[in-house]
Image (cartoon, rainbow, N blue to C red):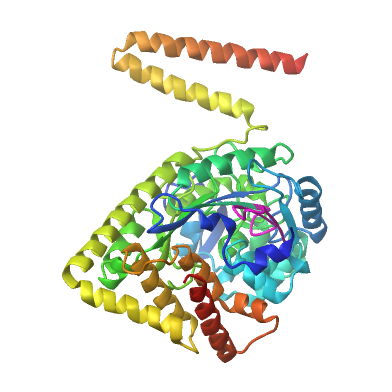
Amino acid sequence: MECQECHERPATLHFTQISNGEKTEIHVCEVCAKEKGYLTYPDEAYSFHHLLTDLINFNASKIESVENDAFKQQAQELTCPHCGMTFTQFKRIGKFGCASCYHTFSTRLDPIFRRAHAGNTKHNGKVPKRTGIDLQTRKQLEDYKKELQYLIETEAFEKAAIIRDKIKALESSSKKSEAGDKS
Amino acid sequence: MSLEHFIDNAISPWMRNDGPESDIVLSSRIRLARNVADVSYPLIADEEKLEEIRDFFQENYEHQSFRNHEDLEFISISDLSAIEKHVLVEKHLISPHLVKYSDEAAALISQDEQISVMINEEDHLRIQLYYPGLQLRNALEDAFALDDWLEERVDYAFDETRGYLTCCPTNVGTGLRASVMMHLPALTLTKQINRIIPAINQLGLVVRGIYGEGSETIGNIFQVSNQITLGKSEEDIVSDLESIVNQLIGHERNARSILMKQSELTLEDRIYRSYGVLEYSRIINATEAARCISNVRLGIDLGIIKHTSRSILNELMVLIQPGFLQHFAKKNLTANECDVLRASLIRERLELEK
């Protein structure tokens, strides 16, 4: 379900508002909820002390056990299963707790990365040599395919044929190594 | 060889070699941020996990050599005295962050001091490589090979879309920070630098003081580095930085020759006065010392001051720092005592050049 306010992000908060005896269902995303004042966030009143205690007691179950509405809301939000960091905590300190956080918060990271990296959200550089062999081949294939496309468009067919052969060779060799792994 | 030799010498061995453009570019640095897969970042990880990582690197890499960078020295930060930590930071061999936060922090430093691998900094690994002068490409090539060499025995936290997963979102992707230390006295003197810095910032690069983030510029030394780590290849990041650095070099040389043409005597006066202060003062604070050293170095570059080696700038910049002074004195010093010792060490050092 999409957010009824911005129609961009998925609605993550659902609640029923009763005003003057009239019931209204509200489905919004966190950003709009905050903007429209549906939600008061604890971080406005958050002190340095809280920040430290949160860091020290990095345990989501503790947060859940606190009898406090604000904290309950936090517990419902994205929490990294590996290190227990919540998205709110991540936003407050600006650092990830572990590599799994990237996966846990993945749907909300693009705007943050875009701001920090001039609009970029995807890695386009080095790949680990040992653990990333498959990745490297795939990346090389992608590069070749792009080049092939360009060569065909510019009608450089002789060069295109060379690239095509390279793609074939690369594809067959990666298949062989996969088969080798299985046997 | 041991820790002492890193600490006793103000100048790192590699600084004695001149690199390309070394009249303006003091050094090039490549830093790669890497993390061990499946372990939380040092910010929140359990002590035992971090100890495991630290011990793993000691067991596997202590006294190993990588290419021509011989004999990696393993240094556990908690074994260092406060002054020793200070000196290693002043020499840029370790970061202020490494000293500050983690009890499990360590570093592997090669004897030539070109390689420093920091362990349990903000990320599990911060791989650093220094080269004299403007040699970003060589440094990158070396850093890549070093990265691969380490990776033979370590599984990195890596994601196909996001790249190398770092603790701070500003390092994700390549984990690369390429930086160049530049001496820009003429651009500072003519105030052109005030127009140039904002322009550079707009290009996704950052200009900072000599000790990195948040530090002041001292001695007209500026650090220029990339800010964007995601979406661009390492080669592109480095070549973008290089082209800006080359333009800065051009502007600085231009400003120098204009100064020489238009006000040679004033410039000469300024340089010799600074030399005089360094040679004769008995009490000198770090800021004044840095300013004078910068002027003298400019004098050397312009051929006004002869028979003094260029590396004196790099060397004196470390020599005048409080940590180094206190290490030399073998005790804690007050600010005043530092100023006295600083003046006397500078005098002695200049005497050696005669």
* Image position, residue B90 (x, y; %): 58, 69
- Inspect the magenta stretch and tell me whether residue A176 lies in it: no
* Image position, residue B72 (x, y; %): 71, 51
Q: From this viewpoint, is residue A155 visible?
A: yes
A85 up-or-down from A162: above or below: below
Image-quadrant location for residue B25: bottom left
Q: How many marks?
A: 0
Q: Looking at this view, is A122 or B189 the one in front?
A: B189
**B71 left or right of B228?**
right
B338 up-or-down from B119: above or below: below
Q: Looking at this view, is B203 or A75 the one in front?
A: B203
* Image position, residue A91 (x, y; %): 56, 61
**B246 left or right of B98?**
left
B47 up-or-down from B30: above or below: below
* Image position, residue B135 (x, y; %): 46, 47
Task: Please give the range of residues in magenta.
Answer: B105-125
**B325 left or right of B54?**
left
- What's the residue at 29%, 62% (across, down)? B196
> In the orientation shown, which residue stands out farthest toward the left?
B262
Q: Looking at this view, is A161 or B165 the one in front?
A: A161
**A56 left or right of A137?**
right
Q: From this viewpoint, is residue B162 visible?
A: no
> In the orientation shown, which residue stands out farthest toward the front?
B354
